Image (tube, helix red, strand yellow):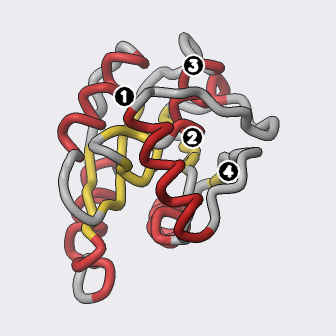
């Protein structure tokens, strides 16, 4: 199965997990780049406000066409119990191109189920697998969850 991992990461947490998933699945990955500066404390606040209001952003063009993959694994941080605006834009721009999807997220508090539900509604496909990694797990032990996620995809 030809697989692509696409992700957006503000702090590097989602990127770390995306790279590990790509390594475990031996597949390509692509980072979604938000044109809006979301660095620092102010960037974090603006990110949460934009997510909560479901505001769209501008992303730099991606190079990999999701239609050419059997599975696209989509990763997002959770902001205000929603996906990041850059992921929302990526999904909107590629709607109808996904054959199968899996989702993963990183987050500090809660909101993964709501975000995953929204992603599923936007895409119109039930994901074959889902993975959530909290900030606490990221600092301690998430390897078993990650292994089970990639095993479930294979």
Q: How far apart are marks 2 and 3 (CA)?
A: 22 Å
Q: Cα distance, mark 2 to mark 4?
A: 14 Å
81 or 4: which is nearer to us? Answer: 81
Residue 2's label in the rendered image is 2
Q: Position of residue 137 (x, y in %)?
A: 23, 78
* Residue 116: quadrant of the picture: top left
Report which residue position mark 1 lands on: 119
In the displayed structure, 58 sits above or below 74; it is: above
Which dot, 2 or 4, sits closer to the camera?
A: 4
Depth check: 5 or 106 in front?
A: 106
- Identify the residue at horizontal 48%, vertical 21% (top origin): 99
What secondary structure is found at the residue carrying circle 1?
helix
Residue 134 in the image: x percent, y percent?
25, 68
Q: Distance between the residues labelled 4 and 1?
A: 18 Å
Residue 132 occupies which quadrant of the picture? bottom left
Counting residues from the N terminus, which is met first, the one under dot 2 or under dot 1? 2
Name the element at disc 3: helix
Q: Is residue 110 above or below residue 59?
A: below
- x 32%, y 24%: residue: 120
Give the distance between the C-alpha atoms of the residues marked 2 and 1, in whole angstroms.
21 Å
Secondary structure beneath disc 4?
strand
Residue matched to label 3: 92
Secondary structure category for the residue under label 2: loop
Q: Earlier in the sequence, mark 2 or mark 3?
A: 2
**Residue at left 40%, top 17%?**
122
Contact between labelled residues 3 and 2, with CB atoms less than 8 Å apart: no
The residue carrying mark 4 is 30
Answer with left or right where residue 73 lies relative to residue 108: right
| Front position among marks 2 and 3 | 3
């Amino acid at each position: 199965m030809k697989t692509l991992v696409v992700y957006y990461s503000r702090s590097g947490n989602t990127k770390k997990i995306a790279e590990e998933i790509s390594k475990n699945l031996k597949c390509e990955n692509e980072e979604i780049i938000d044109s809006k500066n979301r660095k620092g404390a102010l960037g974090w606040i603006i990110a949460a406000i934009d997510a909560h209001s479901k505001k769209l952003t501008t992303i730099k063009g991606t190079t990999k066409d999701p239609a050419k993959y059997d599975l696209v694994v989509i990763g997002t941080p959770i902001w205000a119990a929603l996906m990041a605006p850059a992921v929302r834009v990526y999904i909107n721009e590629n709607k109808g191109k996904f054959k199968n999807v899996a989702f993963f997220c990183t987050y500090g508090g809660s909101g993964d189920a709501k975000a995953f539900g929204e992603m599923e509604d936007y895409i119109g496909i039930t994901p074959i697998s889902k993975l959530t990694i909290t900030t606490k797990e990221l600092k301690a032990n998430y390897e078993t969850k990650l292994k089970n996620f990639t095993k479930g995809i294979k």
